Image (cartoon, rainbow, N blue to C red):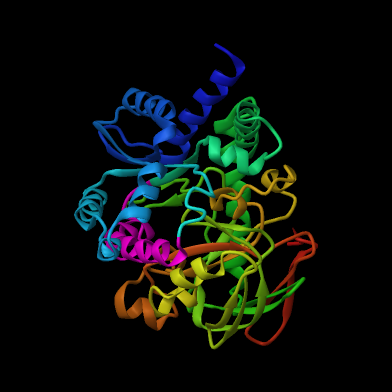
Amino acid sequence: MSAFAEKLEKLAELAIRVGLNLEKGQEIIATAPLEALDFVRLLAEKTYREGASLFTVIYGDNVLSRKRLSLAPEEGLDRAPGWLYEGMAKAFREGAARLAVSGNDPKALEGLPPERVGRAQQANSRAYKPALEAITEFVTNWTIVPFAHPGWAKAVFPHLPEEEAVKALWEAIFQATRVDQEDPVAAWEAHNRALHAKVAYLNARRFQALHFRGPGTDLTVGLAEGHLWQGGATPTQKGRLCNPNLPTEEVFTAPHRERVEGVVQASRPLALGGQLVEGIWARFEGGYAVEVGAKRGEEVLRRVLSTDEGARRLGEVALVPADNPIAKTGLVFFDTLFDENAASHIAFGQAYTETLEGRPTGEDFRKRGGNESLVHIDWMIGSGEMEVDGLLEDGTRVPLMRQGRFVI
């Protein structure tokens, strides 16, 4: 077996054993880009060897998406396969695990009319709500594992031939997911312990707000009442641990949707619906982004943020050290799974119930400050110049990060 094949095997095993922490007899519903066919087959083989009862995969096809967005009648853009997402939600609530193979061409839909792209994305967000709620409520174990899509590789390494770019991206993936270490499972156990230690510290301090200061950023993020910090391996409602993101370097919690004030500027580009959005900035008043802009892709961003009222409020705030393995690659990945774990970030849209004590839903969730939306869009604001303080109820400031690194 070649060194590359051995690492790919380890990544697949990591996704099943650490990411999903698959239960014997469990069903799996997977999503993946069409280009990941061989990797998906490897994942399926590993899951069956671990005792999965059924592996079902739904493939995405960028070529088909472009045809639809170019040729479909206007009214057709308001349609989405709600029947499919309702079925997925039902399966999750009945115990099926969720496996997402991430990795796509960030420029797949470039050049298409932004209003058509935005319209289709809004329709899909509305239809996807039942499945999204099941995931954000952690009714089952789920994980996201990366795949070196050729279009993604060329975006990250534009000056390399495609074959070399794909090889270079796989090596970056192996480094970020700790697959290049002798025992990746043991490395992840140690990493989870370190993340859980930070979570324990932050939960013990009960900060009322976080204050971010950096280039173009002076932002105070009030935290939801009874907020809980999370990071690394997370229990489902039934108590089964899973690592939702491979890789992950973040500790995160729920902002109060009405207590965010100030200005903030993105530190990395965002791949949103097959198009790049760069230079995002926003100004918040009373938790609402009263002004939002971007140097590139602004119309796409505005379309998504018009999905509902909660789309312009925050559902997540995350702290990520600037000296972690992903940041150390020095790469901009144009992929949220990686870029959000290379820098501290915030997210427009839906909050996770796991980040509030007791995992409240409905009116209790809203009363505590949890934000509701059909979208969840992470965007990166951290850098080696970012400073973060925790603010206690009496106004005391506690340094949390200096020059993008933890000082706790």
The quadrant of the picture occupied by the C terminus is: bottom right
Q: Quadrant of residue 27?
A: top left
The quadrant of the picture occupied by the N terminus is: top right
Left or right for 92, reference 236? left
Q: Residue at x 80, y 64 (%)?
A: 385
Left or right for 280, reference 274? right
Q: Residue at x 52, y 56 (%)?
A: 275
- The answer to whether residue 240 of the structure is visible from this angle is no
Furthest toward the top, the residue is 1
Residue 24 lies, in percent from the top left, at 29, 32
- Is 385 contained in the magenta span? no
Of residue 390 and residue 91, the one placed in the foreground of this image is: 91
Of residue 10 and residue 296, the one placed in the foreground of this image is: 296
Residue 76 lies, in percent from the top left, at 26, 61
Q: Residue at x 43, y 45 (%)?
A: 143
Magenta segment:
113-141
Q: Residue at x 19, y 54 (%)?
A: 83
The answer to whether 387 is drawn above or below residue 151 in the figure is below
Residue 144 lies, in percent from the top left, at 46, 44
Left or right for 9, reference 78? right
Of residue 231 and residue 164, the one placed in the foreground of this image is: 164
* Predominant SS along the magenta part: helix
Residue 316 lies, in percent from the top left, at 52, 67
- Is 136 contained in the magenta span? yes
- The answer to whether residue 173 of the structure is visible from this angle is yes
The answer to whether 231 is drawn above or below residue 143 in the figure is below
Q: Quadrant of residue 3?
A: top right
Total labels: the figure holds 0
Of residue 161 and residue 190, the one placed in the foreground of this image is: 161
The answer to whether 388 is drawn above or below residue 363 in the figure is above
